[in-house]
Amino acid sequence: MNRYLVLVLRKPVFDAALIEPHRCFLADLRAQDRIELSGAFADGLGGAYLLRASTLDEATAIAHGDPLHAAAASTIVVREWNAA
């Protein structure tokens, strides 16, 4: 499995009611052993998580299942990360 950094950046139309569904989404990924790290940015404008997937397309498809993406409340950016 490769590692992908997923940036979740809040849009001006962000709805705080989506935070709990987003956390449940991350918890499900954690239960599948797909996430190594996750957390919010100190400035409150989003967060990031380190996702395990086979390909960039798979990682993007997983990240786009996030309720924050589905509701267009956040921009999701997925990048393959060659962390050491």
Image (cartoon, helix red, strand yellow):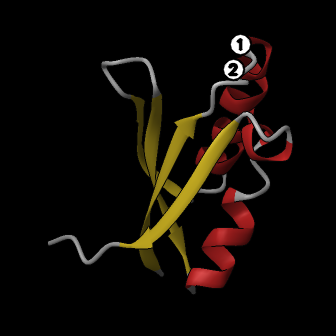
Tag 2 residue: 19
Asked which quadrant contains residue 47, the reply is top left
Residue 13 percent location from the top left of the image: 73, 24
Which image quarter is the C terminus in?
A: bottom left
Task: Give x and y (percent) for residue 27.
Answer: 65, 36
Residue 55 versus residue 70 in the image, above or below: below
Badge 1 density bin: few <14, some 14–19, many ≥20, Cα 10 Å: few
- Residue depicted at 43% across the width and 70% down the height: 79
Residue 16 is marked as 1
Q: Position of residue 41 (x, y in %)?
A: 36, 27
User: Above or below — where is 21 with respect to 48?
Assistant: above
Which residue is nearer to you in this view: 1 or 22? 22
The residue lying at 59 percent from left, 46 percent from top is 30
Question: What element does badge 1 sit on?
Answer: helix
Q: Is residue 16 left or right of residue 52?
A: right
* Residue that protrudes farthest toward the front in the picture: 12
